[in-house]
Image (spheres, helix red, strand yellow):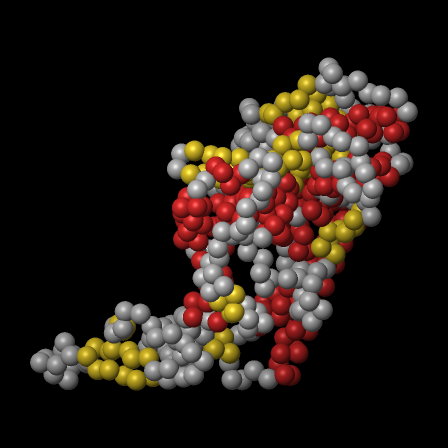
Amino acid sequence: MLEELDSEPEPFSGSSSDEYVADTADSSTSSSDSDSLEVRKTNRKSVNESQWVRNKKKRLLATGARHLNSVNKMVGPRVVGEDCKCKFKCFENFDEQERTQILNKFNEIGEKVMQDTFLVGLISTSEVTRKRPKTGNGRQRNISHKYMIRIGSKSHRVCKKAFGAVHGISSKRIDRLSTFLKFNDAITSPKDGRGKHHTRSNMIPPEIVEQVDSNICSFPKRSSHYSRQKSNNKMYLSPELNVKKLISRQRKLLDEKKKGIEYFRECADKYGDMQMEEINRKMNGSFQIVDGVLDMKDPVDMPQLTHIQLQMVNDAFVGDPSEVITEKFSLSITRRDLLTLADLNWLNDEVINFYMNMIIERGENPKWPKAYAFNTFFYPKLLRDGYHSLRRWTKKVDIFENALICIPIHLGFHWCMAIIDLRTKYIRYYDSTGNSNNTCLKVLKKYLEDEHLDKKKCPLYTTDFKLENLKDIPQQSNGNDCGIFTCTYAEFITRDAKIRFDQEHIPYLRKKMAVELLAGELLVK
């Protein structure tokens, strides 16, 4: 049994440090020495990330202490800024002692992410009630920000300059948090993006790193007698490996991938021209999915997945992540995109946009309501840049010819769905966490008015349109399946079906969506 004699490891300073490990003596040597400890000195380095220079600087910066910046220039401690001297006289709400107390409490938070979360809680957004004429080249504001400062149980509204001065932060930091709040609707906390840029020219793409890592992990491994006594989990590459064997092994893996691709093509050629319902009928007569083998449950009015369909999905999950699995609607789905449907992964834009196009395609059948869907980039751009930035998006489409319009809503780390029903004049918002979004409903209503005026050259009177946040809908019980819920809402609604599924159906729905992406069409058609 090994024990650490020191309660805290010695900080790693870059040079070799000694680590003392205590081993119990062999009880077979002497009964009197059975409880003695033998101190063994090793040259293993102990790493303490908290003592790294850059982490020390970040910690000092967050606590407002004096520190050296990135160019080794001494920066003084964080202090309360100058009086804003605005017409509201914000500084008169607090005396000097209270301002110092607010700053000290803010510094005591200690971590930048926690500080940003605290600041976001003091900033609120609202629509601009009175829009002034646009002057010069400036952009007309659509959202107004309110800044609050709390003292005990009381809150005082202040201007932006006073808000930054009391907390000792720059206006750039406030602008960044305001922008974050605008697009994330306070769903998640801000993240620390310092040192995590993705625009460096010499940066190795993550997919390449992932491929190299998975390839190395796939090499045959063995344990070593040197470390077997301490841990059986530590593995090493076999010394018999050489370049020739690695190349031979890689060729064998490529041959297996080619066989999987050929199998998939054979299935596509065999069943490509047949109706999906006929395939399901024939397969269900030949195969039975044994209860308990698959942790899936089919929702009401949804087709049962066959063994061949499930095998196709499992085969498609294996291989080169960057390989294109299916192409349609001028969109490509790679294996990496398809893997977002596996396990508890989050869906990405490519999968949702492809799925929305399959809904549009099904709506062309007179059997179903005619439907249209915007892509996932529509709503953020509408919020950020307004209608005029989207005028050309519908240059060849008349959205008012459709019965239903689907708008995927991306709130940073959460997917929702908005549906415009032009038949009943409803705009509904579907959130699998039960939250409301009145801003989204109003923005979409305004978009309809602007689009009708631009394309039809006459106003659209929306006084009888009803805005509604749906609550009596299936809700997710984790933080991973919002994308599945979002797409399934749209799939049910665009065929006028009652939404009848639950969290327990998600494993089935993930497989079903994978089958649909591979086939390039919805199963219910």
Relative to 322, say whether 164 is above or below: above
Relative to 24, say whether 144 is above or below: above
Residue 503 seen by the camera: no
Left or right relative to 427: residue 148: left
Location of the N terminus by quadrant is bottom left
Q: Residue at x 62, y 52 (%)?
A: 172
Left or right relative to 365: residue 77: left
Q: Residue at x 79, y 18 (%)?
A: 461
- Taking depth in this image into account, of 179 and 130 the one nearest to the observer is 130
Q: Quadrant of residue 24?
A: bottom left
Residue 336 seen by the camera: yes
Q: Residue at x 69, y 71 (%)?
A: 202
Residue 311 on image: x %, y %: 63, 50
- Taking depth in this image into account, of 465 and 508 the one nearest to the observer is 465
Residue 240 on image: x %, y %: 54, 84
Q: Quadrant of residue 336?
A: bottom right
Location of the C terminus by quadrant is top right
Relative to 386, say whether 193 is above or below: below
Residue 102 on image: x %, y %: 43, 46
Left or right relative to 139: residue 115: left
The residue lying furthest to the left in this view is: 32
Count of marks, rendered view: 0
Q: Residue at x 44, y 42 (%)?
A: 95
- Taking depth in this image into account, of 501 and 183 the one nearest to the observer is 183
Left or right relative to 115: residue 309: right
Residue 390 on image: x %, y %: 81, 38
